C-alpha cells in the first residue's frame, strides 16, 4: 500500500510541475453537504493546515457551507472544533429556546400541549418544518459578527461561496455576496428539518438538492488544483431500507450520487472520510466524525505537503473574531412588522437604545421575539457606526394565525384526560391571542384565555376556567372541618366543582418578574352524596354552593430552566386574594383574604445530580366559616386548583387548615438522557390559627413524607411514578402522573 502511494505521489508531482513550474498554484477546497457527517471537514482542515496548504477559495454546500464559511471567515480548524464541541445540537435542530425567553403566558402554553398543528381556514395541516432555523441563524450571526461588514465574500480572509436551491424553480443559486449568516443558513436549510429562507425575493432551501459538490463552479474561479471532501450518503442495500423515510432519502440521493461519479474524477485530491456508519443527525458522535476526517486526510498527507511546496508562502488574512462581552447599541431599525408595533417588538427585546448591554442579553432579546411564534424568522444584523452599532431587525411574520393543539394526561385526581385546544391570534387586535382548552375524560374541564400583549406597557388578560373532579377522602377530615357527625363512615366521595373568571392587568419588570392585578369571580360547589342531607330535596350534603367575588394580586419570578426537572434557577409565586362578596349559601360569609407563597431553588452538581429546595406557606385572614377555600395538603402530579398543596406521603385532601408552612428537598439524578430517578422528602405544619404561636408552625414538623421516584421527559410531557411513605400514618401511597398537567 505504501509503495502504491509513493508511486501516486511521484506521478502527481510530475503532473504538477508540468502544469505550472514557475506559477503559484491556485488551490480551491470544495466541501460537500452531509449533515453531521460534515463535521469530518474539520478533521480534514486540520491536516490541510498541518501540511501548510494555502487555500485560495472555498466552496461548500449545506454543512460544507457552514464549516467552509466559518473557516473562510478566519477561524482555524482547532477553533472550529471547539465551537462545534460546545454546541448543543438538540437545541439547534429543534429550535429549543430557553424558558426565560418566553413570557409567563407563553411558558404555560408550551408546557401544556404535546402536539401543535396549523389550522388556518379551519383545515388541519402539518408544520412546514421541524425547526425555523432561528438558533442556527443566531449561532452563525454571533460567530461571524467580525465579518458582518463584508458583503462581497471574495473579500473574506479566504474567498468563499456556497450553493442554495430556489425551491420554486428547482435551480441552484450561487451565494457569493450579501450577509454571510443568511447565505449559510439558506445553503443548509434541509427540507422538512429547517424552514426555507427568503433571501432577495427567492425562497431558498438546502443546496444539496441540486448541487451537493460545487466543483465546476469552484474551477471557474480560476483554481488550478481542487481538493474535494465528500461526506455524502451512498446507496443503501435492501437490509438498510427499513422505513418509508429510508426509501425517500435513497430516492433523493440518486442524482447526487450519480453526479459524484463524474465529479470525483474531476477532483485533483479526493478525500472521502469513512463516515457511512453515521447519520446526518449523529451530532452526538462529533469527536469520532472529526477524527475520521483527520485519518482519511492523513492518507494523502504527502501529496498535500508536496502541493504546499509549490505554492507561494503567503499568510492567510486575519480578521480577529470579536471577544468582548458587551456592545453599545445606538439605535434599532425594524422592518417586516406589518401587524406588530414597534413598542411590542422593543418590549420583547427588553431593552431600549441607546444603551450598552452584554451580547448574552442581546441574543436573549432575539430569543424572546422568536418565542412568541409570531415570526417565521427574526433576522438581525449589526452595523458599525460612531460610538457603537446600529441594530437592524428584519422580521418575517408567521402567516398562520390559527392552530389546533392536543394533549393527554393521567393522574390520581383527574384520572384520564384528553385535551383539545383551539388558538387564534390577531382576533381583535394585532397583538392579541385567544385560546380555548376543552378537556374531556373522567372529568369535564375547560380553560379559556384571552391576552393582549402590550410589550413594555401593561398587558390585559381574561381567563375563565372550570374544574371538576370526584375523589374519595377521609371522612374524619370532614367531621373535623365541618363539624358534621359521620360516625361509622370511613371514606366519603367528594364532588368538587370550581368556576373561576378573572380580568387582570400584567406588567413585566426586571426581565423575569411578572405582576398581575385583577378582579376575580368564583363559583364553588362542593358536596357529597355519601351522607344523607337533613334538608328536604337535597340528595346529599352540600358544603358550599356560592358565588364569590373580589380582587387579587400575584407576583411571580421564574428562572428555572425546566419546570418539571429543573437543573438550575429560582422560582417564586406569591399571591393575595381578597373576597368581599358572596351569594352565601351557608348564611355565614364574612370578608376574608388568603395569602400564599412558594419558593423553589435548583442547583446542578456534576454527574447529572441536581438538588431542589422548596419552601412554601400560606395563611387566611377572616372567613372562618368558609372552609372550602382553606389549605388542603396531599397528593402529587395534578394541576393545582384553589389552595391545594402537593404533599408526598398523603393522599389528596388529607390534611387541612387555615395556615401552613412546608419545606421539601429533592435529589434528582439523570441516569441517562431525559430519564431521572429522584429521592424526595417533605415536611409541614398545618392547622387552624397556626400562626398565633411560633411553637405551632416552627419545627419540629407534624407531618412528613418521603418518596422514591422515576421520571422521563417525553414530547407528551413528564412521565412520573412515585412511591411515597409517611411515618406518622405508617402508610404508603403510589402517585402516577403521565403527561403535561392541565
Image (cartoon, rainbow, N blue to C red):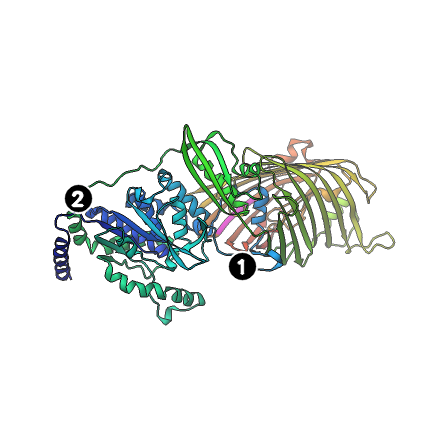
Q: Is residue 406 visible?
A: no
Task: Name the residue that disc number 1 marks.
Answer: 126
* Residue 735 within the segment the image draws in magenta: no
Identify the secondary structure beneath mark 2: loop
User: Is residue 557 depicted above or below 402 in this figure?
Assistant: above
* Residue 677 within the segment the image draws in magenta: yes
User: Residue at point 65% right, 53% down?
Assistant: 437
Which label was assigned to residue 312?
Answer: 2
Task: Name the outermost residue toward the right.
Answer: 536
Picture coordinates of residue 542 (x, y %)? 79, 50
Left or right: residue 576 versus residue 559 is right
Q: CA distance from mark 1 to mark 2?
A: 55 Å
Q: Is residue 356 visible?
A: yes
User: Residue at point 42% right, 37% down?
Assistant: 382
Which label was assigned to residue 236?
Answer: none
Range of residues picked out in magenta:
676-681
Q: Nearer the viewer, residue 149 or 232?
A: 149
Picture coordinates of residue 447 (x, y %)? 67, 50
Q: Residues within 10 Å of mark 1 (few under 14, many from 20)?
A: few
Q: Nearer the viewer, residue 165 or 129?
A: 165
Q: Quadrant of the N terminus?
A: bottom left
Q: Are marks 1 and 2 in contact (CB under 8 Å)?
A: no
Left or right: residue 689 versus residue 122 is right
Left or right: residue 677 versus residue 736 is left
Quarter of the image for residue 628 reads top right
Picture coordinates of residue 76 (x, y %)? 28, 43
Picture coordinates of residue 204 (x, y %)? 43, 53
Amino acid at each position: 500500500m505504501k509503495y502504491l502511494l509513493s508511486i501516486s505521489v511521484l506521478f502527481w508531482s510530475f503532473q504538477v510541475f508540468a502544469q505550472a513550474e514557475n506559477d503559484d498554484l491556485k488551490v480551491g477546497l470544495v466541501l460537500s453537504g452531509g449533515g453531521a457527517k460534515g463535521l469530518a471537514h474539520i478533521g480534514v482542515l486540520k491536516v490541510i493546515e498541518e501540511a501548510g496548504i494555502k487555500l485560495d477559495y472555498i466552496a461548500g454546500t449545506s454543512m460544507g457551507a457552514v464549516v467552509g464559511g466559518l473557516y473562510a471567515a478566519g477561524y482555524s480548524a482547532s477553533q472550529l472544533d471547539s465551537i462545534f464541541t460546545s454546541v448543543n445540537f438538540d437545541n439547534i435542530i429543534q429550535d429549543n429556546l430557553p424558558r426565560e425567553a418566553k413570557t409567563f403566558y407563553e411558558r404555560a402554553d408550551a408546557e401544556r400541549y404535546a402536539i401543535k398543528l396549523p389550522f388556518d381556514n379551519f383545515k388541519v395541516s402539518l408544520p412546514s418544518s421541524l425547526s425555523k432555523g432561528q438558533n442556527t441563524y443566531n449561532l452563525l450571526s454571533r460567530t461571524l459578527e467580525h465579518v458582518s461588514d463584508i458583503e462581497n465574500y471574495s473579500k473574506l480572509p479566504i474567498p468563499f461561496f456556497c450553493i442554495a436551491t430556489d425551491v420554486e424553480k428547482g435551480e441552484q443559486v450561487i451565494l457569493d455576496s450579501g450577509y454571510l449568516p443568511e447565505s449559510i443558513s439558506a445553503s443548509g436549510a434541509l427540507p422538512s428539518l429547517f424552514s426555507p429562507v427568503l433571501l432577495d425575493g427567492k425562497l431558498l432551501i438546502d443546496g444539496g438538492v441540486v448541487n451537493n459538490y460545487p466543483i465546476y463552479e469552484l474551477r471557474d474561479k480560476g483554481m488550478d488544483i481542487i481538493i474535494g471532501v465528500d461526506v455524502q450518503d451512498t446507496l443503501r442495500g435492501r437490509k438498510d431500507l427499513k422505513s418509508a423515510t429510508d426509501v425517500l432519502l435513497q430516492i433523493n440521493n440518486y442524482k447526487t450520487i450519480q453526479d459524484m461519479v463524474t465529479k470525483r474524477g474531476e477532483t485533483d485530491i479526493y478525500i472521502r472520510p469513512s463516515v457511512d456508519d453515521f447519520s446526518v443527525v449523529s451530532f452526538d458522535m462529533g469527536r469520532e466524525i472529526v477524527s475520521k476526517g483527520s485519518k482519511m486526510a492523513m492518507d494523502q498527507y504527502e501529496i498535500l505537503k508536496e502541493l504546499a511546496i509549490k505554492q507561494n508562502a503567503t499568510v492567510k488574512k486575519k480578521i480577529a473574531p470579536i471577544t468582548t462581552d458587551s456592545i453599545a447599541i445606538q439605535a434599532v431599525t425594524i422592518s417586516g412588522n406589518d401587524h406588530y408595533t414597534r413598542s411590542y417588538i422593543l418590549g420583547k427585546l427588553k431593552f431600549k437604545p441607546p444603551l450598552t448591554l452584554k451580547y448574552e442579553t442581546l441574543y436573549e432579546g432575539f430569543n424572546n421575539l422568536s418565542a412568541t411564534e409570531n415570526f417565521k424568522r427574526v433576522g438581525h444584523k449589526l452595523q458599525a457606526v460612531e460610538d457603537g452599532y446600529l441594530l437592524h431587525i428584519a422580521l418575517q411574520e408567521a402567516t398562520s394565525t390559527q392552530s389546533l393543539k392536543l394533549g393527554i394526561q393521567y393522574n390520581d385526581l383527574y384520572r384520564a384526560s384528553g385535551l383539545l385546544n383551539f388558538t387564534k391570534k390577531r382576533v381583535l387586535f394585532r397583538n392579541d391571542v385567544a385560546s380555548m382548552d376543552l378537556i374531556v375524560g373522567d372529568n369535564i374541564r375547560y380553560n379559556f384565555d384571552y391576552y393582549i400583549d402590550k410589550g413594555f406597557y401593561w398587558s390585559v388578560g381574561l381567563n375563565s376556567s372550570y374544574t371538576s373532579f370526584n375523589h374519595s377522602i377521609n371522612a374524619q377530615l370532614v367531621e373535623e372541618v365541618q363539624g358534621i357527625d359521620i360516625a361509622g363512615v370511613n371514606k366519603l366521595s367528594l364532588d368538587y366543582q370550581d368556576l373561576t373568571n378573572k380580568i387582570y392587568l400584567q406588567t413585566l419588570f426586571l426581565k423575569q418578574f411578572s405582576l398581575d392585578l385583577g378582579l376575580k369571580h368564583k363559583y364553588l360547589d362542593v358536596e357529597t352524596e355519601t351522607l344523607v342531607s337533613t334538608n328536604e330535596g337535597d340528595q346529599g350534603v352540600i358544603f358550599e354552593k356560592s358565588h364569590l367575588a373580589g380582587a387579587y394580586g400575584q407576583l411571580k419570578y421564574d428562572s428555572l430552566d425546566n419546570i418539571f426537572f429543573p437543573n438550575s434557577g429560582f422560582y417564586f409565586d406569591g399571591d393575595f386574594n381578597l373576597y368581599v362578596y358572596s351569594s352565601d349559601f351557608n348564611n355565614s360569609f364574612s370578608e376574608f383574604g388568603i395569602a400564599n407563597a412558594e419558593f423553589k431553588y435548583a442547583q446542578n452538581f456534576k454527574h447529572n445530580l441536581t438538588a431542589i429546595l422548596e419552601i412554601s406557606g400560606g395563611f387566611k385572614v377572616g372567613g372562618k366559616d368558609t372552609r372550602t377555600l382553606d389549605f388542603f395538603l396531599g397528593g402529587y402530579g395534578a394541576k393545582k386548583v384553589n389552595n391545594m398543596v402537593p404533599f408526598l406521603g398523603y393522599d389528596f385532601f388529607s390534611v387541612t387548615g387555615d395556615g401552613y408552612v412546608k419545606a421539601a428537598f429533592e435529589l434528582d439524578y439523570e441516569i441517562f438522557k431525559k430519564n431521572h430517578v429522584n429521592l424526595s422528602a417533605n415536611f409541614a405544619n398545618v392547622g387552624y390559627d397556626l400562626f398565633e404561636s411560633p411553637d405551632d408552625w416552627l419545627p419540629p414538623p407534624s407531618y412528613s413524607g418521603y418518596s422514591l421516584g422515576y421520571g422521563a421527559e417525553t414530547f407528551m410531557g413528564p412521565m412520573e411514578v412515585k412511591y411515597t411513605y409517611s411515618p406518622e400514618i405508617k402508610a404508603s401511597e403510589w402517585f402516577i402522573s403521565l403527561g403535561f398537567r392541565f
